[in-house]
Amino acid sequence: MAAEEAKTGTGTAARVRPEWAAHRERGTMTMLRAMTFISLRLGRPAGRIVLHGIAAYFFLFAPTARRHMRSYLRRALRREPSPLDRYRLILSFAATIHDRLYLMSERYDLLDISLEGVEVVASRFERGEGAFLMGAHMGSFEVTRALGRHQPGLKVAMAMYENNARKINAMLSAVDPRLVLDIIPLGTMDSMLQIRARLDAGAFVGVLGDRTFGAERFERVEFLGAAASFPTSAMRAAAMLRRPVIFMAGLYRGGNRYHVVFEELIDFSTTTAADRDAAVRLAIKSYAAALERHCRSDPYNWFNFFDFWREPATLAAGDV
């Protein structure tokens, strides 16, 4: 039944193997450490010169990603993207990775960061209420750390899968072995307990909501003109814990400029168990709509280099 619902674009219970997870990772720790040396020792301008070479390499030698970029940009721009459009998308991606080094080192003085909707987070923080911050592979998540300058004492834990956590920890080690982020590993027996504990302590829990991981349930909703699959696990966790969900995006706008946006999506605090499924479906639609708005306004910020609109292959029961 779930698989049939997914095929009609309204399913909520199918399980999928993500296409993006099968793509081979590019880059090595050697490259990361070289970029760290150039960026932190020689300065941001020198590091940005290197970015153009990296972006040009991927533009020339990643034909599959290039094809999927064209598909996405055609939808976001509502026209046929030029080679320059595709290059700008790759360059924006490289720039946000590059600036992670400065953000993790709290070198905010090098960046021009503006905030929008910060009162949405501030009101929850002042009442001591934890909430989910749901982002996407859009712009820079790390730039949202700048919120701490405006709200001293605000704490954000990032919930992520083990493989991604290893990458973040490797980058932190390359920047400064003393740097530590509060990361909650997903997919473990006590993941939900850790999330609940952070929220009960008044912290915020960040999660990315635009990719399915492994055997995970999804919701098919309209996104940039066609049905696309969005995972429901994080939203369902927020509903079970009866917490609000705030959309966030750290949009890169060229040079050293970032614009951080916060928008409240849904407050599950009064959602009953009987209403949970309907509330989650509504929340996923709201999330997809928010993501679509920002893909339209800042099209060179969404970094999904695979066929996002292809219907995932469902797994048979027990095939996990």
Image (cartoon, grey):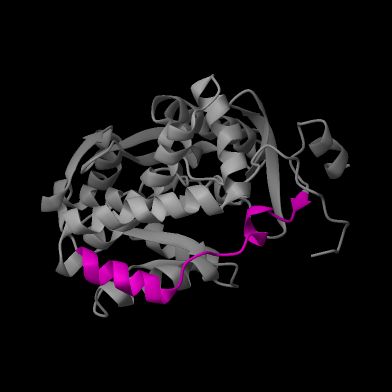
Judge left or right: residue 263 versus residue 277.
left
Q: Is residue 29 magenta?
A: yes
Judge left or right: residue 40 versus residue 66.
left
Examine the rendering and report whether any part of residue 152 can be seen. Answer: no
The residue that appears at 32% across and 77% down in the rendered structure is 173
Rendering coords of residue 87 (x, y %): 43, 40
Q: Is residue 129 magenta?
A: no
The residue that appears at 24% across and 58% down in the rendered structure is 47
Tally of numbered tags: 0
Q: Nearer the viewer, residue 30 or 112?
A: 30
Residues in magenta?
15-39
Q: Quadrant of residue 70?
A: top right
Examine the rendering and report whether any part of residue 252 can be seen. Answer: yes
Rendering coords of residue 300 (x, y %): 42, 36
Rendering coords of residue 157 (x, y %): 37, 61
Rendering coords of residue 258 (x, y %): 25, 40
The residue that appears at 38% across and 71% down in the rendered structure is 31
Quadrant where the N terminus is found in the figure: top right
Q: Nearer the viewer, residue 133 or 242?
A: 133
Which residue sits furthest bottom? 177
The residue that appears at 27% across and 62% down in the rendered structure is 101
Quadrant where the C terminus is found in the figure: bottom right
From what the image shows, is residue 288 above or below residue 190?
Answer: above
